[in-house]
Image: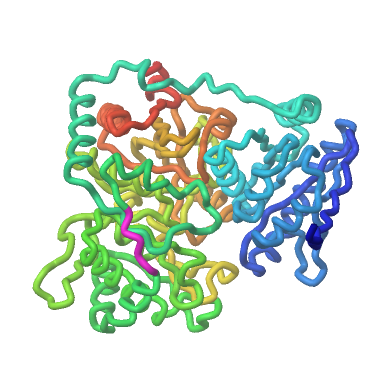
Amino acid sequence: MPKYEIPKISKPPKVGKKQVLLAASGDLRLSANQCCWEKQKEMEDALTAAVEAAGYEVVRAHPYKENEKHGFIGSQKEGLDVFSRIDPNAKIIIAEAVWQYSHHVLPGLLAHKGPILTVANWSGTWPGLVGMLNLNAGLTKAGKKFSTLWSEDFTDEFFVEGLEKWLDKGEVKHSLKHVTPLKKVKVPSAEAKLGAALADQLRQERAIMGIFDEGCMGMYNAIIQDELLNPMGVFKERMSQSALYYETTQVSDDEARQVRKWMEDKGMKFVTGPNPASDLTDEQILTQCKMYIAAVRLADDFGCDLIGIQYQQGLKDLLPASDLVEGMLNNADRPPVKSRDGHRVLFEGQAVVHFNEVDECAGLDALMTNRVHKAMGQPVETTLHDVRWGDWDRSGTVQDYVWVFLISGSAPPAHFAGGWAGASSERQPAMYFRMGGGSLKGVSKPGEIVWSRIFVENGKLKMDLGRAEVVELPAEETERRWNLTTPQWPIMSAVTYGVDRDQFMARHKANHIQVAYANSAKEADAAMLAKAAMAQAMGMDVFLCGTKKNGKAW
């Protein structure tokens, strides 16, 4: 009988019945982890106090790293190592006060057998809520059971009671009474027929989703499997970001200057400075204008109906950020781009639909929105936003709870008060982008919007839709919110109809939310129902969240 060297597998130490593990997933960039650690530590201290008050001891699953000056899990490899050394049956809390790359912890959580709780601090300072929602969506897609909670200071009744339930029972559930399956709603025949016809057209004529390198920022939830996407008539063109980089280098300075001049003639303002390490420079803007031209030409080359640039981790060491590019693409009124031979204006008079961070769920949503709104004579411009944070209006102007929807890329000037004249570009924070590059910043105009999200659950594509109003806040209140988040980015102040803060958080299956304006409340209702009917005809499970503007059920 042969003798083999059998590996010795050490068993992780067991955690006591009154002990709870705590882990924190972080960014992939050391600079971001270092900048954000102070707020994470504050959040963990408050969370630990809450757990201890409930009679449990918190055991951190991984140490603070003195050499790196932070205590986050900073890579997938590190996350796998951490989970290989912990009790797989222990209760574990994933605590997030920052944006995090879910793939740092998702593999370990999928194998974990004990109860899982994701927790975020209710703060706009760093995108902890965004990070937690992304992880929640990834767990949902993977079919992994988990519970979730959030709090401003971890002493409020909602959080304390929820935490005690989770510690005692291993789960906490939230009310979803604001969610109505579309099959229980009578959709008017005009919107039902339009939605069905648009779904049939998409299946018959087909569309191409151009993706500059699939997968971004650890977002497992942002990838739609081909076998779910293809039957709807949508097919991926997997494009290399090396092609985008190369094509950017082939655009002339004169062409790029014409793009910048077009924007400045429209009233766009660029906030520039001399130091490329901290300021937005003319050279960075020139390169961004070249990338814009390159992206349009590549979309035309491959016959794409929409495209997604990978963004943060994609070309950050080669090119300035793609934010300015993405916002230009999503606007129907944008700088013209000619074919390489100069004989054609590409996508003339149209938005080149773009989805930020190659979030394919947002991309599919944007494609549907574009077609529904075009058919109904509604504004076609659409974008995703981060569900960044929310707060009551401290000025007292708006009595409802006001969300801060915020994204660095993709927001079109058509959404801003003043359009291009209300837009500006500021340098992206250096902690994210060494090569700089400007954003496309503005304050979203007041108006009626449709919000939505496509997500994957139980092996199926699903869609949530709702209605909201973008409200106008006093300048001081908008500045307060900007300064508590990321002031270089475009901001949308939204009131969701019939969905309060905790209901929204309990249901939403993504870090992103898709938004589009309509010309009136009545037309927004119709556009939402037509898109819902289209999604249902495409084979999705569809749900309406909240109420009409007047509070009446759908």
Quadrant position of the N terminus in the picture: bottom right
Which residue is found at the position 56% from the left and 28% from the top? 503
Please give the range of residues in magenta: 236-240
Residue 367 visible from this viewpoint = yes
Q: Is 554 displayed left or right of 526 in the figure?
A: right
Q: Nearer the viewer, residue 528 or 90?
A: 90
Q: Of helix, strand and loop, which mostly describes the magenta segment?
A: strand
Give how far across and how far down residue 382 sits, in percent.
Answer: 33, 47
Q: Nearer the viewer, residue 248 or 462?
A: 462
Q: Nearer the viewer, residue 438 or 535?
A: 535
Give how far across and how far down residue 146 sits, in percent.
Answer: 65, 35
Residue 394 visible from this viewpoint = no
Which residue is found at the position 46% from the left and 38% from the top? 456
Q: Is residue 217 above or below residue 152?
A: below
Give how far across and how far down residue 499 sits, in percent.
Answer: 50, 27
Q: Is 511 displayed left or right of 309 in the figure?
A: right
Residue extending furthest toward the left: 343
Give how far across and how far down residue 514 sits, in percent.
Answer: 40, 43
Quadrant position of the C terminus in the picture: top left
Which residue is found at the position 35% from the left and 61% from the top? 238
Q: Is 213 displayed left or right of 113 in the figure?
A: left
